[in-house]
Amino acid sequence: MDSMSCNGIRAGIVYASITGNTRELAEIIADGFRKHKIEPAFCHAGSFPAWQLGELDLLAVVTYTWGNGEIPSEMKPVYEAIASQAPKQLITGAAGSGDSFYPAYCGAVDKFRDLLFVHTQLAVTLKVELMPQESDRERCQRFTDILVNRCLASAAT
């Protein structure tokens, strides 16, 4: 999960997607980082190198929701790694796509939000209805802007 940037911020995106909607969301978020001249490490949950959590300045967790608001099985190791290994100073955001037809709309995002709030410096969350639309791109950019600005502010103190 190597990341590079022009301004010294080491960023990562870990995602899981079953329909392609959440992968698309993760790619839009990655584009948002690139507008800040940050090339994020981009990896599927199945190949997430948990041991590198301590090397990141910021992390975006992008997930779909399974069943009745559950975290998908491939994201459970990511969840457990963050719970046990994430440094408290890590700036984080949780995002995901879902279908508001279900009562636990983007429930996995909520579960990651709660975990990240306790174990890291949660900066922002984002929920997108199904496949990201053109109108969601501005929301995705705000998501990455908040993450990057929070990281820069943290580094300045």
Image: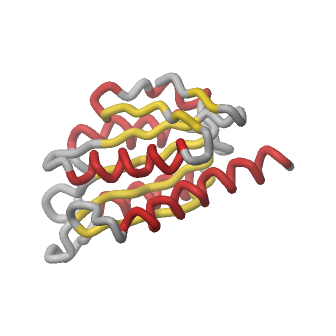
- Left or right: residue 10 compared with residue 70: right
Q: At which x and y percent is residue 67? A: 13, 59
Q: Is residue 50 above or below residue 68?
A: above
* Applied colour scheme: secondary structure
> What residue do we see at 61% from left, 33% from top?
10
- What residue appears at the point 37 percent right and 59 percent down from the top-left corner? 111
Please name whichever residue, 61 or 3, is drawn nearer the observer in this view of the structure: 3
Residue 101 placement: quadrant = bottom left
Asked if residue 145 lies left or right of residue 82, the reply is right
Q: Residue shown at 53%/42% (left/top)?
A: 34
87 up-or-down from 22: above or below: above
Residue 63 percent location from the top left of the image: 31, 51
The x and y percentages for residue 14 are: 39, 39
In terms of image quadrants, where is residue 135? bottom left
> Where does residue 18 sit, x and y in percent of width and height?
15, 46
- Compared with 21, 51 (above or below) is above
